[in-house]
Amino acid sequence: EVQLVESGGGLVQAGGSLRLSCAVSGFTVDDYAVAWFRQAPGREREGVSCISISDGPTYYTDSVNGRFTISNDNAKNTVYLQMNSLKPDDTAIYYCAAEWGPCRDDYDDGYEYDYWGQGTQVTVSS
């Protein structure tokens, strides 16, 4: 059974940090792109970052560039999103998704992903 399971969300004060994990089972992510998306109440889903596990580009949306870092641990079949200097505007449900191949430059359209996780809530208080 294929599963993407996010964890690491929670409540943090502005300026704090969280590390989200996306644990993948049922397939190995070696030939995939794994992206993080988020959706806040009343807002459209937004692509946050994408990593090409084997070879290819890494992307960040402008609002998180320099604050968030995406990485992977092949041995654990897990992708991480380190989030520093968090702001109240980062409050959202964060989802990971996997698509075969490298990250597309339009990765944030949310289409063509093969698998999605169930999401983890991140709340940043001011």
Image (cartoon, rainbow, N blue to C red):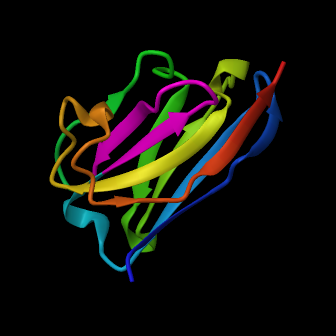
Q: Residue at x 32, y 32 (%)?
A: 108
> Residue most toward the bottom?
1
Nearest the camera: 52 or 112?
Answer: 112
Q: Quadrant of the N terminus?
A: bottom left
Nearest the camera: 93 or 50?
Answer: 93
Where is 3 relative to 92, above or below? below
Q: Residue at x 56, y 43 (%)?
A: 94
Where is 50 relative to 80, above or below? above
Position of 108 with respect to 117 (left or right) is left
Q: Residue at x 49, y 16 (%)?
A: 63
Position of 7 with respect to 51 (left or right) is right
Residue 51 drawn at (x, y percent)? 32, 44
Q: Residue at x 34, y 40 (%)?
A: 50
Give the overall secondary structure of the magenta segment. Answer: strand
Position of 77 with respect to 17 (left or right) is left
Where is 116 relative to 48, above or below? below
Q: Is residue 53 visible?
A: no
Q: Is residue 81 visible?
A: yes
Q: Which residues are magenta?
A: 34-52
Residue 79 drawn at (x, y percent)? 45, 56
Nearest the camera: 113 or 57?
Answer: 113
Residue 22 drawn at (x, y percent)? 50, 59
Residue 112, magenta (yes or no): no
Q: Quadrant of the C terminus?
A: top right
Position of 43 with respect to 54 (left or right) is right
Residue 90 drawn at (x, y percent)? 63, 26
- Give the quarter of the image for residue 3: bottom left
* Total residue callouts: 0
